[in-house]
């Protein structure tokens, strides 16, 4: 969404108030400032705008696979705000950076029922609430930053300085970026999915990620016991998400279709096949079946399927679930993805894997692209993987196969994780592959978006442990100063001025707008934040 320039807004407001102020004494300049600081009117406007950003990024990736995008999972608005501020300091732009909203972290950290596993047990409104919170935080970052720019404008002593200040205001890049929002398995049937999708979109989500598990049996993608739904059922939920986008005028809304079939060995329902080769028959053919014989006859209450010219019995567990044939996960993933793209209108795919292996993912994507040439993925660089151990094992196996090392040179078990191997040739090679993992997977496996689902969960735990060990141990205040404040100052992290970070200067500016010299401001000489003024 193109924002109006300072000059355009000033001309509009001054046309209404030629004297330079409203009848109540509010100045034109102050009105212009507040209009510019309000970078978006509604969060639905954000969804519409950010959908366009994602579409442009997807087109750029199609032309050049090095232009992949990234995000980190954030469980609060403050986490998201600080991530985006850090990216702006590092790159000077937020382009290619998104926020991932993890259903796992909503369940674990952001619901009113306590810490819960990733099983869709939390109240679904918590997902929309977190999207809303993140965008409130990102918009406040805009307000704070623009207020600082307007301070420079107000203090400009020359026309040249004033022109430069206005140029900085007009060139300001918003902290608002796309959110990829996890809607789990839809929290119910297709109508429930549609209703929740609308709430997430109205909160600002331009992209919804939905998985092909059964809603009432949903598990974390990296746990056992996953149960998938027939493809027709999943396609109906994809359509529900699309209808929600269309109804709300988010015409470019993005849908990520996630398949858990690689690790999901069960289905709750045997779909009805209406014709050979249809989606139902493709799904059914992978069921684990057994022959009907005199020794294994049909019994009351059992189900029979006609396959390959004969009746067979699908195996059934005591809980009524039907298992798939072992080893069929990869083939089911490929079929899931093709159906989601061609029949369900999904824009991106998500293949949940059990290890981080570029070759494995690239192989599946190559099969999918035979049917859908521009298929693109969102990939979960998950903390559920032991990245160090996995990459070291991959290097070890490759080097043994190439004859570069002997099998006895390095252990083949968890001992390979030991710090003793950090500085070895194998350890350094594994780290080098980690550093280029996202680049490799984007170039070779069609990964448009790389994310880490739960980094702020683990970072918060680690950071609190680090500070607590020192503060409650021998270092006391040194622990805080050394591990937190000194690093904030030296890295230029704006949160070191915590009063300013949460809008204290915004409050002072507004008081000046309405009270003038009578304004009681917090930013005077006695404000301890002045100790950081030179930083």
Image (cartoon, rainbow, N blue to C red):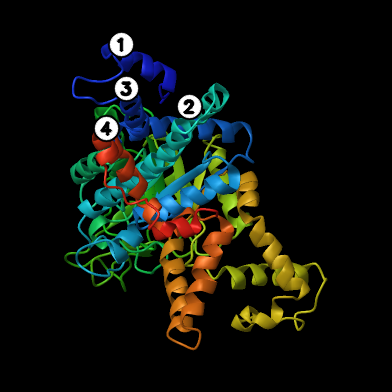
Q: CA distance from mark 2 to mark 1?
A: 20 Å
Label 4: how many residues lie within 10 Å, few (<14), some (14-19) or many (20+)? some
From the image, state whether disc 3 or disc 4 is nearer to you: 3
Q: Are marks 2 and 1 in contact (CB under 8 Å)?
A: no
Q: Quadrant of the C terminus?
A: bottom right
Q: Are marks 3 and 4 in contact (CB under 8 Å)?
A: no
Please tell me which residue is depicted at 62% across the width and 31% down the height of the picture: 63
Q: Nearer the viewer, residue 300 or 154?
A: 154
From the image, state whether disc 4 or disc 2 is nearer to you: 2
Image x and y of residue 482, in percent? 54, 73
Please tell me which residue is depicted at 42% across the width and 85% down the height of the picture: 472
Q: CA distance from mark 4 to mark 2?
A: 36 Å
Q: CA distance from mark 3 to mark 1?
A: 10 Å
Please determine whether, in this image, residue 214 is positioned above or below residue 153. below
Label 2: how many residues lie within 10 Å, few (<14), some (14-19) or many (20+)? some
Residue at numbered disc 1? 15
Residue at numbered disc 4? 243
Residue 304's quadrant in the figure?
bottom left
Residue 447 appears anywhere in the view: yes
Question: Label for residue 278?
Answer: none
Q: CA distance from mark 3 to mark 4?
A: 43 Å
From the image, state whether disc 2 or disc 1 is nearer to you: 1
Q: CA distance from mark 3 to mark 2?
A: 17 Å
Q: Earlier in the sequence, mark 3 or mark 2?
A: 3
Residue at numbered disc 3? 28
Residue at the far bottom: name it: 474
Q: Earlier in the sequence, mark 3 or mark 4?
A: 3
Question: Label for residue 170?
Answer: 2
């Amino acid at each position: 969404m193109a924002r109006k320039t300072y000059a355009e807004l000033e001309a509009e407001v001054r046309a209404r108030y030629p004297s330079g102020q409203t009848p109540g004494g509010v100045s034109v300049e102050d009105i212009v400032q507040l209009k510019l600081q309000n970078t978006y009117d509604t969060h639905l406007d954000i969804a519409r705008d950010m959908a366009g950003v994602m579409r442009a990024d997807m087109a750029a990736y199609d032309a050049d696979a090095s232009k992949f995008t990234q995000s980190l999972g954030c469980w609060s608005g403050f986490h998201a705000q600080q991530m985006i501020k850090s990216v702006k300091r590092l790159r000077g732009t937020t382009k290619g950076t998104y926020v991932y909203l993890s259903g796992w972290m909503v369940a674990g950290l952001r619901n009113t029922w306590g810490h819960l596993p990733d099983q869709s047990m939390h109240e679904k409104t918590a997902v929309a609430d977190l999207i809303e919170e993140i965008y409130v935080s990102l918009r406040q970052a805009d307000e704070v930053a623009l207020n600082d720019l307007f301070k420079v404008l107000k203090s400009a002593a020359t026309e040249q300085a004033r022109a430069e200040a206005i140029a900085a205001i007009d060139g300001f890049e918003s902290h608002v970026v796309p959110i990829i929002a996890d809607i789990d398995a839809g929290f119910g049937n297709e109508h429930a999915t549609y209703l929740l999708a609308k709430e997430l979109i109205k909160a600002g989500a331009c992209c919804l990620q939905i998985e092909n598990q059964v809603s009432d049996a949903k598990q974390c993608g990296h746990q056992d016991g996953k149960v998938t739904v027939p493809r027709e059922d999943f396609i109906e939920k994809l359509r529900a998400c699309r209808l929600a986008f269309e109804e709300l005028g988010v015409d470019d809304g993005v849908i990520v279709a996630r398949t858990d079939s690689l690790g999901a060995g069960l289905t709750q329902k045997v779909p009805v096949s209406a014709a050979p080769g249809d989606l139902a028959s493709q799904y059914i053919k992978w069921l684990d079946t057994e022959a009907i014989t005199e020794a294994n006859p049909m019994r009351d209450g059992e189900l029979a399927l006609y396959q390959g010219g004969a009746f067979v019995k699908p195996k059934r567990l005591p809980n009524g679930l039907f298992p798939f044939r072992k080893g069929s996960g990869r083939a089911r993933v490929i079929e899931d993805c093709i159906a989601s793209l061609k029949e369900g209108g999904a824009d991106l795919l998500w293949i949940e894997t059990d290890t981080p292996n570029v070759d494995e993912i690239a192989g599946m994507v190559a099969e999918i692209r035979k049917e859908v040439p521009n298929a693109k993925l969102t990939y979960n660089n998950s903390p559920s993987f032991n990245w160090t151990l996995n990459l070291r094992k991959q290097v070890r196996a490759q080097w043994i196969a190439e004859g570069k090392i002997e099998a006895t040179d390095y252990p083949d078990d968890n001992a390979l994780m030991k710090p003793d191997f950090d500085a070895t040739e194998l350890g350094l090679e594994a780290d080098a592959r980690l550093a280029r993992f996202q680049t490799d997977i984007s170039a070779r496996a069609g990964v448009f978006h790389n994310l880490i689902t739960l980094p702020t969960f683990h970072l918060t735990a680690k950071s609190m442990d680090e500070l607590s060990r020192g503060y409650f141990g021998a270092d006391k205040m040194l622990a805080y100063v050394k591990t937190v404040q000194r690093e904030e100052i030296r890295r230029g992290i704006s949160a070191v001025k915590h009063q300013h970070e949460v809008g204290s200067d915004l409050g002072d500016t507004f008081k000046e707008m309405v009270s003038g010299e009578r304004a009681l401001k917090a930013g005077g000489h006695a404000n301890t934040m002045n100790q950081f003024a030179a930083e």
